[in-house]
Image (cartoon, rainbow, N blue to C red):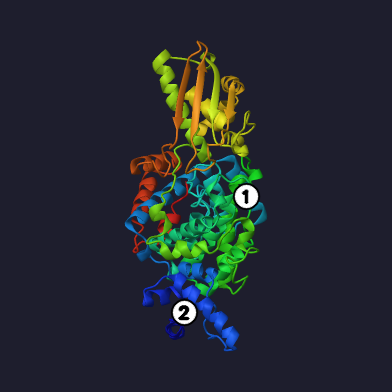
């Protein structure tokens, strides 16, 4: 086996190419090479110098550099197109928020506008900036309303990736302009890298309480996607990963604040910058994914060896077996369990009483998983409200729906909402796992006549186990993109539905303005 490996190393440049010839897994190659390194060191024989020792960082970098359309199943193509359409929609509605306005002012003050700028800022009147700044602003817009998709283990995977590669595509000359199929491939490797890294930590299965995942794996996914779109080889891909790791991290303490959307934006920006820096020859630690002081610094139980199993044993990329949650409501995903349970309870009350008001409610009990940052009795802002079981349950009971308007000041500060919040208690039993895969929420409403109305939700509509229909994904997109002309919205749907190799990427990116 070792003799054959040494001969193949003289001919092929990556582990993945060798595995295709041998018909074995990457783990076999890696373990053989590691044994060979140990043997040659003991015997004093110099290892073949033209081929570096294989490690897990190289394994993933091979995966990024060689990822192709052939790696995408029909199911993955369908799912990722839904994600792309949804991300454009939430990015466009997010671009009209106060946060987005402030960030554009900041960008103008600090970076200005150059006549050479080529990357479009979504939802503006054709404002263009440098690719990293456009990626930053568009990435922030996707997360301003917490309306973007969520995966398991928990992260928001699309927001850091799509803005970076569309901004990059805008900036490339016509001779190097990628196609929409190239964008689809780059997008999927960005999602794949995030999923693979998250699965190297068992703790990442739970709702995070220390670090915000889009700011950690998001920047790695953005770097991988940008590197793939640039066509970087394995060596530069690994350094893009190393550079990106130095840009990673953000505390969960900023969840429920105006700062949280910046996490997706900075990951989009710095992932793109990491790839551009690597392209120019900047290098980092070439084993960034192998060591505790590398990517392992972000997760105490990080186990890089799991990458071998993830990339070696899977017949398809992770999105094939693990669908995404595309949100029905513009708030933290955990809220969706409580909202659906509250809406069901509301229907029961209406069937019992007909019309009713908040005065008919004596008290509300919410049974939810333990997570401090989404347990907010009296939220003080729009962003706290999006992260409050109590507020979203009470609003759903009052209004029978949750929309972007729910979180605006005039709705949020209604006396009826405040009165219900004061009557609301939350319990967090130990058996209720704080994980989007396993949690449940129960809403119990006590009426003034003493009757109890109870409803429980274990899988809300929009969850990967109960995904939105294609029709509802399009309806959501159309509602979120009312700033665009009707024809433009139809054009976007058609372009994303096809994502073909004969259509230039900038045909999509250059129509995302009002």
Residue 338 vs 212, above or below: the answer is above
Percent coordinates x, y for residue 427 in the rendering: 58, 29
Dot 1 falls on a residue whose secondary structure is loop
Decide which of 60, 452 is in the foreground and name it. 452
Q: Which of the pair 350/133 is nearer the observer?
A: 350
Left or right position of 248 against 394: right
Q: Where is residue 78 in the image (x, y as percent from the top left)?
A: 35, 52
User: How many numbered dots are placed on residues in this image?
Assistant: 2
Residue 211 bears which disc, if any? 1
Of residues 27 and 351, the one nearer the viewer is 27
Task: Kindly identify the residue that appears in the image at 60 percent across and 22 percent down.
Answer: 418
Residue 13: which numbered mark, if any? 2
Q: In which quarter of the image is residue 303?
A: bottom right
For this view, does 10 lie left or right of residue 218?
left
Q: Where is residue 157 in the image (x, y as percent from the top left)?
A: 50, 52
In three-dimensional space, the C-alpha distance between marks 2 and 1, rounded to whole angstroms, equals 36 Å
């Amino acid at each position: 086996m070792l003799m054959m490996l040494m001969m193949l190393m003289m001919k092929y440049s990556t582990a993945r190419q060798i595995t295709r010839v041998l018909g074995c897994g990457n783990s076999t190659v890696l373990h053989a090479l590691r044994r060979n390194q140990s043997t040659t060191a003991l015997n004093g024989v110099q290892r073949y110098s033209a081929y570096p020792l294989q490690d897990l960082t190289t394994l993933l970098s091979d995966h990024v550099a060689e990822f192709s359309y052939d790696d995408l199943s029909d199911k993955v193509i369908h799912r990722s197109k839904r994600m792309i359409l949804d991300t454009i929609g939430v990015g466009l509605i997010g671009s009209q928020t106060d946060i987005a306005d402030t960030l554009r002012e900041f960008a103008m003050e600090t970076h200005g506008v150059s006549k050479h700028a080529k990357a479009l800022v979504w939802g503006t009147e054709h404002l263009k900036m440098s690719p990293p700044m456009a990626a930053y602003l568009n990435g922030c817009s996707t997360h301003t309303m917490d309306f973007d998709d969520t995966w398991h283990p928990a992260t928001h995977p699309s927001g850091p990736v799509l803005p970076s590669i569309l901004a990059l595509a805008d900036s490339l000359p016509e001779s190097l302009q990628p196609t929409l199929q190239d964008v689809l491939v780059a997008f999927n490797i960005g999602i794949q890298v995030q999923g693979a890294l998250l699965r190297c930590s068992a703790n990442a299965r739970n709702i995070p309480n220390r670090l915000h995942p889009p700011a950690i794996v998001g920047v790695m996914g953005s770097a991988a996607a940008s590197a793939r779109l640039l066509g970087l080889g394995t060596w530069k891909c690994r350094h893009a990963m190393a550079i990106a790791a130095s840009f990673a991290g953000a505390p969960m303490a900023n969840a429920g604040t105006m700062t949280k959307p910046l996490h997706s934006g900075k990951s989009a920006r710095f992932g793109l910058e990491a790839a551009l820096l690597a392209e120019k020859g900047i290098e980092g630690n070439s084993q960034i994914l192998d060591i505790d002081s590398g990517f392992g610094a972000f997760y105490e139980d990080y186990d890089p060896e799991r990458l071998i199993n993830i990339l070696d044993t899977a017949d398809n990329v992770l999105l094939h077996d693990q669908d995404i949650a595309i949100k029905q409501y513009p708030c933290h995903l955990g809220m969706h369990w409580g909202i659906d349970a509250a809406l069901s309870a509301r229907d029961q009350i209406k069937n019992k009483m007909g019309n009713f008001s908040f005065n008919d409610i004596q008290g509300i009990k919410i049974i939810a998983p333990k997570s401090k940052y989404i347990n907010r009795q009296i939220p003080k802002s729009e962003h706290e409200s999006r992260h409050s079981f109590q507020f979203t349950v009470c609003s759903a009971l009052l209004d029978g729906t949750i929309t972007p308007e729910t979180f605006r000041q005039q709705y949020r500060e209604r006396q009826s909402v405040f009165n219900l919040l004061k009557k609301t208690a939350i319990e967090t039993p130990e058996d209720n796992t704080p994980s989007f895969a396993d949690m449940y929420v129960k809403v119990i409403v006590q009426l003034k006549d003493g009757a109890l109305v109870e409803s429980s939700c274990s899988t809300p509509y929009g969850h990967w186990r109960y995904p939105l229909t294609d029709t509802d994904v399009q309806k959501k997109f159309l509602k979120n993109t009312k700033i665009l002309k009707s024809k433009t919205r139809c054009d976007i749907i058609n372009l994303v539905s096809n994502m073909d190799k004969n259509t230039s990427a900038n045909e999509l990116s250059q129509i995302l303005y009002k």
